[in-house]
Amino acid sequence: MNIVQVEVSTKCQLDCIMCPKSCFDDWIPKNMDMDVFEKIPFKKFKYAHLQGWGEPLLHPKIDEMIEIAKKRCKVGLTTNGLLIDRHVDSLTKLDLIAVSVASADPDVHAAVRKCDLEVIKRNIRLISENRGKTRIVVTTIMMRDTIEGLPKMIDFASECGADEVIANNLDYIPSESLTDLKVFGSKPDRRIGEILEKTRKIAEDVGINFVARPIVMEEALVCAENPIENCLITVDGKISPCVYLHLPTESDRIVRYFEGERVEVPKVYFNSLKDWEKSEIRKIFRRRLSFLPFTEIPPLPNVCRTCYKAYSL
Ligand code: SF4
Ligand code: SF4
């Protein structure tokens, strides 16, 4: 298999407006037990991303976790950036570190992510100055309130010594109040395309790699999470196809807002990688990938039909 995402902690010190943690009262903040982590067969995977729903640097044994996983495969993680300075030795051994930033404008960033952008900037620089081969990525979510500032994110990344900016979509909408924040759609606003183009040009000039997820909804044969090759190991050690079919909440269902409608889908878990490998979801995606011309493409798995990731976003 290719990538395993490992949810080392579901705790987080922030309350970002678009995060399901801020929307659901039954969130279970928890750190992964070390005996669960040590049983993960990292050698089966090319790359392990030590993050699910939550902030991985809040796990008290994150340095040890990085060391264990690094002996077996490539390793990276996504962080909100606030605690980087406490883990510089470990983080500079990673293959990839992604830091989430809402905007290069400190006020906009604070409105969305409720924290001080200056601290994050200082911390990204710290990694940049001390790293070996670690790739530094600044990730952001394209939202109505932040998209105008996207071109400035390139300068921000460059000033911090980052290599790449990735602009993701608000592809999981956990609350009705967030539905108008998305910028994608079947016919997205032309202005969004212009902003992306401008950002691409600046990135080219500055020498920063810029990747933006598509903003036009189109059903994909297999979603970008690619459950044929990748999976998530949750904080409790269960296997799930992706973060979109798991939430660390008490409920056994996931609430999504899809095309303006409130939808509920069951969470999807497997007890072992073997069970996951034999799962119907993987079989369906495989069949979709190998459909023959002039034959009908098998429909998406039920739980995926209302997931924006199934529409190339
Ligand atoms: S930093 Fe990440 S996990 Fe924490 S509240 Fe924000 S989006 Fe959620
Ligand atoms: S379409 Fe969505 S829910 Fe289905 S596997 Fe992909 S990311 Fe997960």
Image (cartoon, rainbow, N blue to C red):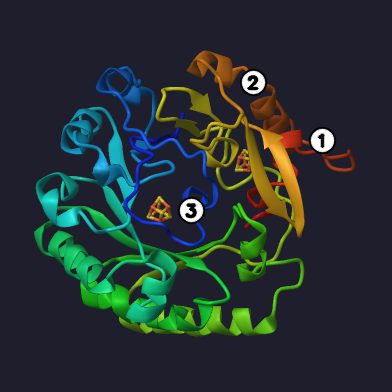
- Residue 180: image location, x then y, percent: 66, 69
Whether residue 253 is situated above or below residue 85 in the rendered picture = above
Q: Element under label 1?
A: loop
Which circle's residue, 3 or 2, is located before the other in the chain? 3
Name the residue nearer the viewer: 8 or 46. Answer: 8
Is disc 3's CB within 8 Å of ligand 1? Answer: yes
- State the separation of the CA atoms marked 3 and 2: 32 Å
State the mark number for residue 279: 2
Is disc 2's CB within 8 Å of ligand 2? Answer: no
Q: Amino acid at mark 3?
A: Ser
State the mark number for residue 298: 1
At a point 35% along the width and 33% down the height, the residue shown is 30
Query: In the rendered view, does 249 fall on the left or right side of 181?
Result: left
> Which of the two discs, 3 and 2, sits closer to the camera?
3
Location of residue 126 (image quadrant): bottom left
- Residue 127: image location, x then y, percent: 16, 59
State the mark number for residue 22: 3
Which circle's residue, 1 or 2, is located before the other in the chain? 2
Quadrant of the displayed image that contains ligand 2: top right
At a point 72% along the width and 54% down the height, the residue shown is 258
Query: In the rendered view, does 285 fall on the left or right side of 64?
Result: right
At a point 35% along the width and 36% down the height, the residue shown is 48
**Residue 110 appears in view:** yes
Q: Amino acid at mark 1?
A: Pro
At a point 59% along the width and 36% down the height, the residue shown is 245
Q: Element under label 3?
A: helix
Q: Amino acid at mark 2?
A: Ser
- Residue 86: image location, x then y, percent: 12, 51
